[in-house]
């Protein structure tokens, strides 16, 4: 029991830091309509534009008959959403507006906050496209994914930790697929190098 209790102060401190960061980002919300409009758009609709923009490097890869990278991107998305679903079921962190006074700018159902599905999708597409398809598109989508994450906090429906968890899940999913690809290539090389 003492070993477990040693971690509790650290967990509480992490929660305090997470909430302080939330206050820094969400605090100015609701003061300038033009900024709020941009943030509401980014929090709600930008992820769909990221999906739409992702079709460009995917379409180019398919046109050039580069099927494996497209499949790897798809596998990374499946892994990321599976991991996000498991994490959401394992924790009970409620959304900021359920337990604090916040500037909530968009309507949202109550429920588990960690991780952000919007940010998980956006970061997985960005990291996956950067790793498997096109660096330049990956950077553009990465900046857009970060904007989605910040906006989700600004409008009061997620904590910064939810966004960080989404980015971590995305990076681990993409890394797992990339590692699998690397190991497969090594096995293929070893097989082809064997004397017949």
Image: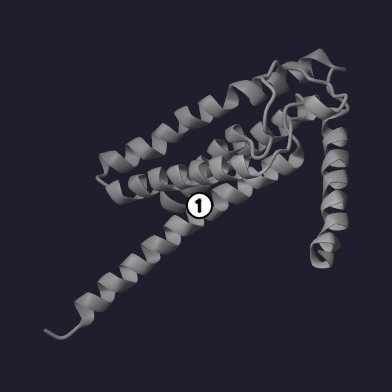
Q: Is residue 79 left or right of residue 190?
A: right
Q: Position of residue 45 (x, y in %)?
A: 58, 21
In percent of the image, x 50 and y 58: which residue is there?
175
Q: Nearer the viewer, residue 18 or 53?
A: 18
Q: Is residue 138 visible?
A: no
Q: Is residue 165 left or right of residue 154?
A: left
In percent of the image, x 62 and y 46: which residue is there?
167
Q: Quadrant of the C terminus?
A: bottom left
Q: Nearer the viewer, residue 100 or 124?
A: 100
Task: Spot the residue most to the top.
Answer: 33
Residue labelled with disc 1: 173
- Element on which disc 1 rests: helix
Q: How many marks?
A: 1
Say if 174 sits above or below 140 in the image: below
Q: Is residue 149 left or right of residue 7?
A: left
Q: Position of residue 12 (x, y in %)?
A: 86, 50
Q: Position of residue 68 (x, y in %)?
A: 31, 51
Say if 83 sits above or below 172 in the image: above
Q: Nearer the viewer, residue 161 or 13?
A: 13
Answer with the quarter of the image where residue 193 lies.
bottom left
Q: Position of residue 90 (x, y in %)?
A: 63, 45
Q: Is residue 68 left or right of residue 191?
A: right
Answer with the quarter of the image where residue 102 lies.
top right
């Amino acid at each position: 029991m003492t070993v477990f209790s040693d971690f509790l102060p650290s967990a509480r401190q992490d929660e305090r830091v997470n909430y302080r960061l939330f206050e820094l980002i969400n605090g100015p919300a609701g003061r300038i309509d033009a900024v709020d409009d941009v943030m509401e758009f980014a929090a709600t609709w930008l992820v769909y534009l990221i999906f739409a923009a992702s079709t460009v490097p995917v379409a180019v890869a398919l046109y050039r008959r580069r099927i494996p990278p497209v499949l790897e991107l798809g596998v990374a998305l499946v892994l990321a959403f599976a991991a996000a679903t498991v994490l959401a079921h394992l924790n009970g962190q409620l959304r900021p507006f359920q337990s604090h006074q916040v500037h909530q700018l968009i309507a949202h159902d109550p429920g588990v906050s960690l991780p952000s599905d919007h940010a998980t999708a956006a970061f997985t597409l960005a990291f996956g496209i950067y790793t498997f398809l096109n660096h330049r598109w990956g950077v553009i989508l990465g900046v857009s994914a970060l904007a989605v994450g910040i906006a989700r906090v600004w409008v009061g429906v997620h904590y910064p930790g939810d966004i960080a968890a989404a980015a971590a899940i995305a990076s681990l999913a993409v890394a797992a697929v990339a590692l699998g690809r690397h190991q497969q290539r090594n096995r293929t090389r070893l097989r082809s190098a064997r004397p017949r």
